[in-house]
């Protein structure tokens, strides 16, 4: 069996996947990102230095690792080049260790404008996108009008596709959104400049990654966002435009499902959400504010404050099933230090009916009432603890209860932001 591990978020994103991928990268040979765009913000803290990665896999912080950006990722070339430059300026090697899929789709200037203006049109029903053009880029991909990374290497093809697209795009933005249209020559010149800088990274990443698996290399697949933001299995329409779930790794990298050996889910010890959409266990008032401040719950990409709430076992059971989890990691356990009583949502109630499983009807999910089980908190600090036996007994009991309710073994616990502030219970490679 190949040693291929998928790391997936099992809440609404922001679970701490970047740190976990960085840690696991020490024993991985290849790290590959399979979906999303530069709306992702994966944070890694090494000693006192913080790195925030948006498109490049977290494994780039290990110089001897191969990093791939898969075909399932939509790429803003300016954002990617800025990220490469930022890493190099901080002494991180980025060169022959990074590959970009020919089949990744490009985010174009008109995608950003459409994203922003369509959110404005929605008013109170806006989705809370980052307005970076990611959704519209995926729309064009599915509509078969997208422009791919490989088209940067074929100027004539790029110009033909761009000209065809702008006939429709300019009519839309000028007549519906009442904003200026786009000049094809200006965009062409800009993107040909990107082509010159990115050409060294563009490759057949599906071939590279399948060869690594055939050669018995340790391979790590990194997703962005989280399961409840999955376009098919999340809280639609308050979702992202791709498939963050484990199955998305197969599509987003060109790897068959028989080659995946483990699926590792990442969950906070509580729950957070950014932007619009239902959130049954959300805590408002002083306690919610406390979780936000102690946990540093502000978006790594946007700085937006995250909504905070109690751990929700209903959505975690849904995530465990959808992803086929073989193990789970709990992050930010230390944020719960000092809370006397911790609540865990075990089910929902709506119109007198109990829901043990995640309801697909968004109106029910928006109005359901969480049913809680209370767990005794702890006063002893867990911050930076690296030995499970040194955790407070109440913290151990909380973790054990999560395992019992979820039916999935906890294999790692994060007790702080830094790379080494981890309790490893089971090796992944």
Image (cartoon, grey):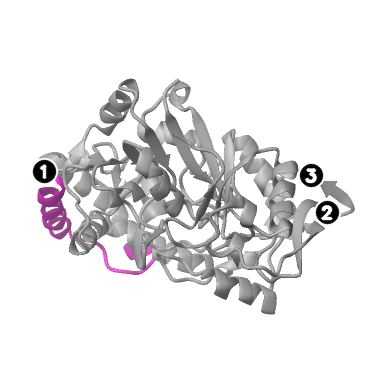
Q: Please tell me whether residue 166 is drawn above or below residue 128 in the rendered image.
A: above
- What predominant SS class does the magenta segment belong to? helix
The residue positioned 13% from the left and 43% from the top of the image is: 200
Q: Name the residue under label 3.
A: 356
Crowd tier of the residue under label 1, counting other residues whose Cα lies within 10 Å: few below 14, some 14–19, many 20 or above: some
Identify the residue shown where x is 66% and y is 46%: 316
Q: Name the residue under label 2.
A: 349
Q: Position of residue 137 (x, y in %)?
A: 36, 49
Badge number at residue 403:
none
Instruction: Specify the quadrant of the image occupied by residue 371.
Output: bottom right
| CA gap, disc 3 and disc 1 | 55 Å
Closest to the observer: 288 or 244? 288
Magenta-colored span? 170-199
The answer to which of marks 2 and 3 sits earlier in the sequence is 2
**Camera sees residue 180:** yes
Q: Residue furthest bottom?
A: 286
Is residue 192 highlighted in magenta? yes
Ranked by sequence position, the earlier of labels 3 and 1 is 1
Q: Reading the chain from its start, which is encountered first: label 1 or label 2? A: 1
The N terminus is located in which quarter?
top left
The answer to whether 206 is drawn above or below residue 37 in the figure is above
Q: What residue does disc 1 label? A: 155
Of residues 362 and 206, the one drawn nearer to the viewer in this rendering: 206
Q: Which secondary structure, mark 2?
A: strand
Q: x, y percentage for residue 76? A: 28, 54
């Amino acid at each position: 069996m190949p040693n291929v591990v998928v790391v997936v978020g099992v809440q609404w994103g922001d679970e701490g996947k970047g740190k976990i991928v960085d840690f696991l990268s020490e024993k991985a040979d290849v790290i590959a990102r399979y979906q999303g765009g530069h709306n992702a913000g994966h944070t890694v803290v090494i000693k006192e230095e913080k790195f925030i990665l948006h498109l490049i896999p977290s494994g780039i912080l290990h110089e001897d690792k191969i990093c791939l950006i898969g075909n399932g990722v939509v790429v803003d070339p300016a954002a990617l080049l800025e990220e490469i430059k930022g890493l190099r300026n901080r002494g991180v090697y980025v060169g022959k260790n990074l590959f970009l899929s020919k089949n990744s789709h490009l985010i174009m200037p008109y995608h950003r404008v459409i994203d922003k203006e369509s959110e404005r049109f929605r008013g109170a029903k806006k989705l809370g996108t980052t307005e970076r053009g990611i959704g519209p880029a995926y729309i064009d991909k599915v509509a078969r009008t997208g422009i791919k990374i490989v088209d940067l290497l074929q100027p004539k093809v790029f110009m033909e596709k761009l000209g065809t697209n702008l006939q429709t795009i300019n009519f839309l933005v000028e007549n519906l959104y009442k904003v200026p249209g786009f000049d094809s020559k200006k965009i062409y010149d800009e993107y040909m400049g990107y082509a010159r800088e990115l050409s060294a990274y563009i490759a057949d990443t599906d071939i590279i990654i399948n060869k690594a698996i055939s050669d018995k290399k340790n391979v790590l697949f990194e997703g962005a966002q989280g399961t409840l933001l999955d376009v098919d299995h999340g809280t639609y329409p308050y979702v992202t435009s791709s498939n963050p779930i484990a199955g998305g790794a197969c599509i987003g990298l060109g790897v068959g499902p028989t080659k995946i050996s483990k699926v590792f889910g990442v969950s906070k010890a509580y729950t957070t959400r950014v932007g619009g959409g239902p959130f049954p266990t959300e805590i408002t008032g002083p306690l919610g504010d406390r979780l936000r401040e102690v946990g540093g719950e502000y978006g790594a990409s946007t700085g937006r404050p995250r909504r905070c709430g109690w751990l929700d076992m209903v959505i975690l059971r849904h995530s465990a099933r959808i992803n086929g989890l073989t193990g789970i990691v709990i992050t930010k356990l230390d944020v719960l230090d000092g809370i006397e009583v911790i609540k865990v949502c075990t089910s929902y109630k709506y119109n007198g009916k109990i829901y043990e499983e995640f309801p697909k009807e968004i109106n029910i999910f928006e109005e359901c009432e969480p049913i809680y089980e209370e767990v005794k908190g702890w006063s002893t600090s867990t911050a930076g603890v690296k030995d499970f036996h040194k955790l407070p007994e109440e913290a151990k009991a909380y973790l054990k209860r999560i395992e019992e309710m979820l039916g999935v073994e906890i294999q790692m616990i994060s007790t702080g932001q830094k790379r080494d502030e981890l309790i490893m219970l089971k090796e992944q490679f």
